[in-house]
Image (cartoon, rainbow, N blue to C red):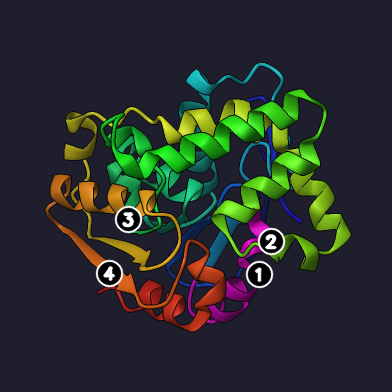
Amino acid sequence: MPHLHADRAVTFYRHAGSGPALLLLHAGASSGVQWERVLAALAPRWEVVAPDLYGHGHTPCPEDMSPGTLLERQVAVLLALLDTLGGPARAVGHSYGAVLALSLAAAAPARVRDLVLVEPVAFGLLPDDDPALAPVHAVEAACRERVLAGDPAGATRHFLDFWSDPELWDFLPDADRQAIVAGARERHFIGGPAVFGAPFAAADLARISCPIRLVTGDDGPEAPRAVAGRLATLLPQAEPITVAGAGHMLPLTHHRAFLRLVESMP
């Protein structure tokens, strides 16, 4: 697996194909391995890169990372990764990765050709008392409590039970489970707080003028749909799309529909 030296750290990523640049950013409690089927399908027509984000997969979270610095530092790494490609990229982000894709476009709009944001979790865009946030906050509190009690596996399973198929944990290969568990502390005390509370000001979003697709399912937790609705009002060029019967993990569960949405943008 190729790797990139940036931000005094090493980021591992997957790379395949040739053509226009396409950046894939994975969900939380995942890694670039999430995109293996997508890479294989898109490589004949695109040059695709799929990094393991900080604290995920093979990319460790630097010891000096904090929730207050993660977004800026992760975006800097993504820009360095885009330097290895030619021209602006189509940035596709899922969940956690969707917030980072949005941050990338706000920080460097000229580097992002267009955006596909799937089930974004930028909960800082919603009022604190939005009822859709209550179950998210409850799950995060329970996960942090389990991590502190020395049960990162229990925290991870609880997290996955809420955000994906409750039976997913039982079907994951042992190596994948170990990798996800290993990132539990970073996920719930650094990455999660940074991304869930990402401070997108109106001026940040105003810098984004590229075409955007806001993709959600009509099943699963309500909070990402509420975020997508809020983004649709703040980004007038955004096209909201609902995938019928899909939940939060729609890039995996509705693979063909997801590919069509990614490739059919003008």
**Image coords of residue 207 (percent x, y):** 20, 38
| Residue 3 visible in this rendered orientation of the protein | no
Q: Could you give the CA–CA distance between mark 4 and mark 2, rounded to whole angstroms?
A: 25 Å
Going from N to C along the chain, the mark reached first, 3 or 1, is: 1
Going from N to C along the chain, the mark reached first, 3 or 2, is: 2
Q: Could you give the CA–CA distance between mark 3 and mark 2, rounded to whole angstroms?
A: 25 Å
Residue 227 in the magenta stretch? The answer is no
Q: Which is more foreground, mark 3 or mark 2?
A: 3
The answer to which of 186 and 133 lies nearer the viewer is 133
Q: Could you give the CA–CA distance between mark 1 and mark 2, rounded to whole angstroms?
A: 5 Å
> Which residue is the site of mark 1?
36
In the displayed structure image, the side of residue 159 where residue 134 appears, left or right = left
Going from N to C along the chain, the mark reached first, 4 or 3, is: 3
Highlighted range, magenta: 30-46
Residue 40 in the magenta stretch? The answer is yes
Q: Counting other residues with Cα less than 10 Å from the Cα at mark 4, is it few (<14), some (14-19), or many (20 or more)? A: some
- Residue drawn at 28 percent across, 43 percent down: 109
Q: Quadrant of residue 60?
A: top right
Q: Which is more foreground, mark 1 or mark 4?
A: 4
> Which residue is the site of mark 3?
225
> Which residue is the site of mark 2?
33
